[in-house]
């Protein structure tokens, strides 16, 4: 009986409707597109950016946003200061240092540059051919994100 009570208590303590954003790496996109064609959301951010952190902890934790993204898109969470080499769209992209402790990844520049500059956070949406179909470079709340993605889903 004690085991049954512990078991029931455990599952009652888990938040109902808990959802998590499904994230993929750039290297997975080609194989995923073969299974199901979807637009790709690339969230470009930096660890030091406070608006990026709010989007990660609020916007991308919204259950309606999570549901829409998981069902209709592939999602890449991309730190613009990532140090590893990334092969994407048959091209090599690497980290470009700018001083002793700073720099930016070439792929962040490629996908996040708007009007010859990059700002964080940046949302970039690619179609299944890896062409940029949407870019936005400032904070988005969940409602605005859902509205934008509603227009971009296929």
Image: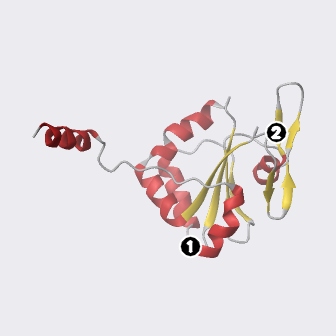
| Classed neighbour count for the residue bearing mark 2: other residues with Cα under 10 Å, few (<14), some (14–19), many (≥20) | some
Q: Secondary structure at mark 2?
A: strand
Q: Secondary structure at mark 1?
A: loop
Checking the image for residue 154, the label placed there is 1
Residue 152 seen from this side: yes
| Classed neighbour count for the residue bearing mark 1: other residues with Cα under 10 Å, few (<14), some (14–19), many (≥20) | few
Frontmost residue, 53 versus 5: 5
Residue drawn at the location 73% of the way across and 71% of the way down: 129
Report which quarter residue 50 is drawn in: top right
Number of residue marks: 2
Up-down relation of residue 123 to residue 128 (above or below):
above
Frontmost residue, 137 versus 29: 29
Of labels 2 and 1, earlier in sequence is 2
Task: State the image coordinates of residue 83 (x, y, percent, origin top left).
Answer: 79, 39
Nearer the viewer's eye, disc 2 or disc 1? 2
The CA distance from mark 2 to mark 1 is: 32 Å
Report which quarter residue 97 is drawn in: top right
Direction from residue 21 to residue 110 in the image, left or right: right
Frontmost residue, 23 versus 119: 23
Task: State the image coordinates of residue 5 (x, y, percent, origin top left).
Answer: 14, 39
Frontmost residue, 60 versus 141: 60
On the rendered image, what quadrant is the C terminus found in?
A: bottom right
Up-down relation of residue 53 to residue 8 (above or below):
above
Q: Which residue is mark 2?
A: 104
Residue drawn at the location 64% of the way across and 71% of the way down: 33
Direction from residue 146 to residue 9 in the image, left or right: left
Residue 126 seen from this side: no
Mark 2 touches mark 1? (CB < 8 Å): no
Direction from residue 143 to residue 26 in the image, left or right: right
Task: State the image coordinates of residue 37 (x, y, percent, origin top left).
Answer: 61, 73
Task: State the image coordinates of residue 2 (x, y, percent, origin top left).
Answer: 13, 36
On the rendered image, what quadrant is the N terminus found in?
A: top left
């Amino acid at each position: 009986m004690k085991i049954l009570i512990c078991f029931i208590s455990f599952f009652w303590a888990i938040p109902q409707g808990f959802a998590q954003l499904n994230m993929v790496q750039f290297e997975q996109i080609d194989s995923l597109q073969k299974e199901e064609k979807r637009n790709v959301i690339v969230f470009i951010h930096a660890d030091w950016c406070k608006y990026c952190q709010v989007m990660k902890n609020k916007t991308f934790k919204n259950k309606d946003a999570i549901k829409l993204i998981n069902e209709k898109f592939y999602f890449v969470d991309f730190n613009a200061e990532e140090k590893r080499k990334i092969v994407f769209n048959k091209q090599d992209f690497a980290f470009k240092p700018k001083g002793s402790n700073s720099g930016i990844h070439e792929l962040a520049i490629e996908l996040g540059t708007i009007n010859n500059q990059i700002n964080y956070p940046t949302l970039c949406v690619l179609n299944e051919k890896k062409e940029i179909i949407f870019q936005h470079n400032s904070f988005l709340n969940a409602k605005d994100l859902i509205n934008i993605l509603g227009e971009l889903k296929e």
